[in-house]
Image (cartoon, coloured by chain):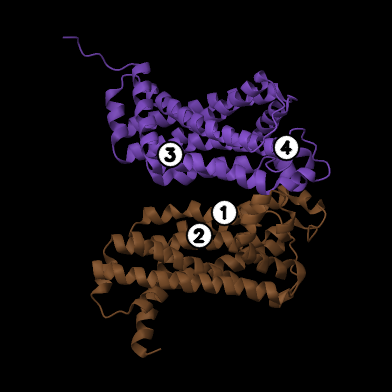
Chain colours: A purple, B brown
Amino acid sequence: MRPHRPAGFRDVAFAVAWRSIHNFLSNPAFLLPAIVFPLFFFISFAGGLSAIGEVPGFDFPSGYTAFQFVFVLLQSAAFGGVFTGFGIARDFEIGFANRYLLAAANRNGIVAGYAIAALARALITWTVLTAIALIAGMDVGGSGVDIFGLYALAVLVNLTATMWAAGVAMRVRSIQGGPLMQFPVFLILFLAPVYVPLSLLSGWIHAVASVNPVTALLEAGRGFVSGEPTVVALAFAIGIGLPVLFALWARGGLRRAEAAG
Amino acid sequence: MSGSLRIQVGELARRSVMRTLRQPAQIVPALIFPLFLLAVNSGGLQDATNLPGFPTDSYLTFALAVPFMQGALFSVMNAGTDLATSIETGFLNRLALTPLRGGALLSGLLAGTVVLGLLQAVTYLVVGLVAGAELAAGFGGALVIVALSVTITVAFGTIGLFAALRTGSGEAVQSLFPVFFVFLFISSMALPLDLIQTQWFHDVASANPVSYLLQAFRSLLIEGWEIGDVVLGFAIALAIMALGMAAAASALRTRLVRT
């Protein structure tokens, strides 16, 4: 008989990820909103606002559908992370997370597992969203490398949001912390150039969007999809820096959860 | 209204109003969320006013109609969740043991929605005007806007009551929120109907009653007194209210029989 060996980082991460992904895929109440909401935003923005593409000064080469696709892609990336935070909070509420804490020798693996699950659910959403966008006639001007860059940014946004939401969830340890996870993400996303490029914004929204890190991510993503990459270095610097920062935030949350027992 | 019925409605109305006012979690998002979206959208879409045929040069004025509809959506959740909680905690079963009439119960439960609707309407209008929106119909128009907003809020609230009575679950009522958001998003929320270029979207938005509710607000804000638009808005709201109340009354009878 093999001696009992405490689960290490990788074992813990895969176990937590498998359970979260299984829950996501087997429960329509989780699966459907994750897919339907981004599609809905995409249809609403790209369909209902297509006339915005004719506003004087709007010169995005791939058209309004592609312009909005990038926003919805990054938004779904962010909310994939936030909804995973809801799952973490729920696990704490029902006591399952405490069993994770007891069983895992390396508890950082728990956070990593949730991050893998968040990425998996985002990948499912992106697949459907991309297929619908292409069917709707989205004009993609970027090369394969550009498109890889776009999805790499989306992965980084997903990771950032997951780390943020995990940090909140492990501090609050209740689904009542949901608005705290969701609202700041919603806020920072919509305080970026959502409907028109930054150059067409004016007044306070231009001032806020100019210093909002999401603006660089959006501009780089739109540059990738149109085949005219822009602010790539800044976007990836932000895209890599934010997950690192929020990983520290999530680790702090894990320590709080451990201390709370 | 007989004295007994008045007392029944009054007691339930008082309870409904107190429950609403004691729950900041119901009031604050219903006020903040629509105003936040108004601020963002009016800043981000100001250039849409440069499109030929756009009815005003202020997108804020155009967009000010939307918070009234979003506030009404919150009333679905608030009214429905409150009643669902009463069902889940057994309060409705206790009421069923009293001689309380169904109509009194439903009317009383909507009192909190009326108060919240009034608070929302005044807040949205005052904030919008302070931020620079125009009101072509003047002070009288402001009163009509508030009245229309409260009517729509109550109409949507009846749908929340129906959902709560049908399902008996607060979670199920909450899950209705995205469904109603679809009605809002696939409407003339962001652009006037005649400027929506995507044909299928234009067709759906034209058939969506929410577009005409929005137009009723916009006519007062942008054009002045376009009586036809205002009457149509009230007619749609009252029709929704009548249907919602009938459905809720039917669901209440079913639930009390089941109990």
Please name the residue shown 45% across and 55% down the image: B176
Q: Give me the disc on residue A31.
A: 3
The mark closer to the camera, 1 or 2, is 2
Question: Mark 1 belongs to which subunit?
Answer: B
Of the residues shown, which amino acid type is indicated by label 1? Phe
Q: Extreme left residue here?
A: A1
Q: Do labels 3 and 4 share a chain?
A: yes
Of the residues shown, which amino acid type is indicated by label 4? Ser
Label 3 – label 2 distance at C-alpha = 24 Å
Of the residues shown, which amino acid type is indicated by label 3? Leu
Q: Give me the disc on residue B74.
A: 2
The mark closer to the camera, 1 or 3, is 3
> Closest to the observer: B136 or A57?
A57
| Crowding near the residue tagged with mark 1, few <14, some 14–19, many ≥20 C-alpha atoms within 10 Å | some
Of the residues shown, which amino acid type is indicated by label 2? Phe
Q: In this view, does A128 lie above or below B33?
A: above
Determine whether the residue tagged by mark 1 lies in a helix, strand or loop: helix
1 and 3 marks in contact (CB < 8 Å): no
